[in-house]
Image (cartoon, helix red, strand yellow):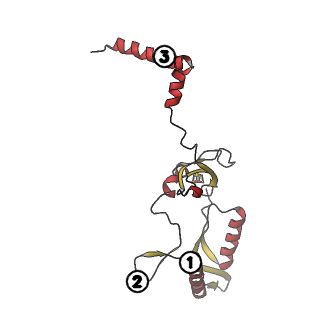
Amino acid sequence: MAVTRRQFMTVSAAGLAASSVGALGFVGAGDALAAGVRPFKLERATETRNACPYCAVACGVLVYSLGDKSKNAKSSIIHVEGDPDHPVNRGTLCARGAASLGYIHSANRLKYPMHRKPGTDKFERVSWDFAMERIAKLMKEDRDKNFIAKNRDGVTVNRWLSTGFFGGSSLSNEAGYLTYKFVRSTGILGFEDQARI
Ligand code: SF4
């Protein structure tokens, strides 16, 4: 059956009026509407407060996960959003922070120290002890070899230019201060702490 534009508008208006009345609780339509609404997806999730690690702003985030160890279910993060109670961002996140669920589950995310032995193109997982000892050993060797105590004019400069250091944007003030002091005390000038937004 062909429906004219006027008939279509009349039917639509009548439907809208009926659903509005129903939404007010009349004729049981409100209950039917409520029954049709999907349960809130975070209702059964565990909420954990954290800080976005992407930059020095360190916005507060709420991380929602499902899974319960006591019931032998694997935990999984299902949603991340800005923390409205956090004084830095008051619930807002920039595009990077808002997309953090993607990098949490990224197959390329680095979760452990990895080591590539000479002569191979494969990285393998190593312990933190191994990684720390190796880094310390290589730093010591490089510093012993390349440290510059004085410049050409005989002025003391105490520079170490052949090694750089990454800090962390989500470090606390105190941890950042100690990191800075350590790095500068070695003579390193190439120090990136990401804290310049
Ligand atoms: S500004 Fe963006 S990247 Fe930086 S901490 Fe906040 S959400 Fe993360």
Q: Earlier in the sequence, mark 1 or mark 2?
A: 2
Q: For the residues carrying marks 1 and 3, which lies nearer the camera in this image?
A: 3
Q: Residue at x 71, y 62 (%)?
A: 173
Q: Which quadrant holds the C terminus?
A: bottom right
Q: For the residues carrying marks 2 and 3, which lies nearer the camera in this image?
A: 3
Q: Residue 18 vs residue 160: left or right?
A: left
Q: Residue at x 57, y 74 (%)?
A: 164
- Give the Cα distance between marks 1 and 3: 68 Å
Q: Please determine whether, in this image, residue 139 is positioned above or below residue 25.
A: below
Q: Which quadrant holds the N terminus?
A: top left
Tag 2 near tag 3, CB within 8 Å: no
Residue 72 place in picture, x, y as percent: 54, 58
Number of the label disc, if any, that sits on residue 119: 2
Q: Earlier in the sequence, mark 1 or mark 3?
A: 3
- SS state under label 2: loop
Residue 121 place in picture, x, y as percent: 40, 77
Residue denoted by label 3: 18
Instruction: Give residue 172's quadrant in the image.
Output: bottom right
Q: Residue 171 vs residue 80: left or right?
A: right
Q: Please determine whether, in this image, residue 149 is positioned above or below residue 53.
A: below
Type of residue at label 2? Gly
Residue 77 place in picture, x, y as percent: 54, 53
Number of the label disc, if any, that sits on residue 131: 1
